[in-house]
Amino acid sequence: MAEYFGCGFARVAARQSFLKPNGKIEYDQDLRWKRYLSQFQGPHSDRFAVAEKKYFHKRSNVLSLHFKWWKTKDKSQYIEHFGQRNWENLLELEKKQHERMNCQGCAVHHYTFQSLFPSWGKKHFT
């Protein structure tokens, strides 16, 4: 699961897609998918695309559980660091280094924050 959304910006965008602008839960899965994709419009859309909605729904639900179980203060730091505002403020050169899977941009430029994301293993998701 963590590899499917390997970029911190993709993880936070997927997690934020579960929330309406007023902070309440969004239950419409199609709107969640569209909200996620809208964050990475333009020249970056192909690197963050999820080809089929069913994969996004399945993987984002598991990711949402990761965020739900994450109870430390690191979660808010992680969400703030990889939030949409910080994505928009990145230079284009750095944005090009990020992608949904195997993200070298996070590994190189954001390792400290990327390493905050917990890894619980597959036993929690079966």
Image (cartoon, helix red, strand yellow):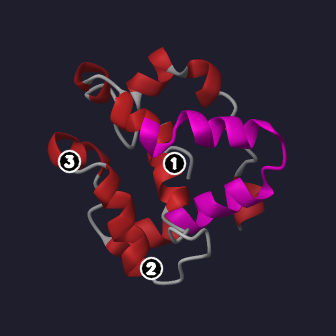
Residues under numbered marks 1 and 3 in contact, where contact means CB atoms less than 8 Å apart? no
Where disc 2 sits, the SS reads helix
By secondary structure, the bulk of the magenta-drawn segment is best described as helix
Question: In the rendered structure, which amino acid carries the disc numbered 1?
Answer: Arg
Q: Residue 70 placed where, x, y %?
A: 78, 50
The residue pinned by badge 2 equals 29
Question: In the rendered structure, which amino acid carries the disc numbered 2?
Answer: Gln
The residue pinned by badge 1 equals 11
Q: Is residue 74 above or below residue 52?
A: above
Which residue appears at 72% of the width and 48% of the height? 121
The residue pinned by badge 3 equals 46
Q: Which residues are magenta?
A: 60-85
Asked whether residue 76 is drawn in magenta, I would say: yes
Q: Is residue 95 above or below residue 45?
A: above
Q: Quadrant of the C terminus?
A: bottom right
Task: Classify mark 3: residues with Cα within 10 Å, few (<14), some (14-19) or many (20+).
Answer: some
Position of residue 17 in the picture relative to residue 63 (left or right): left
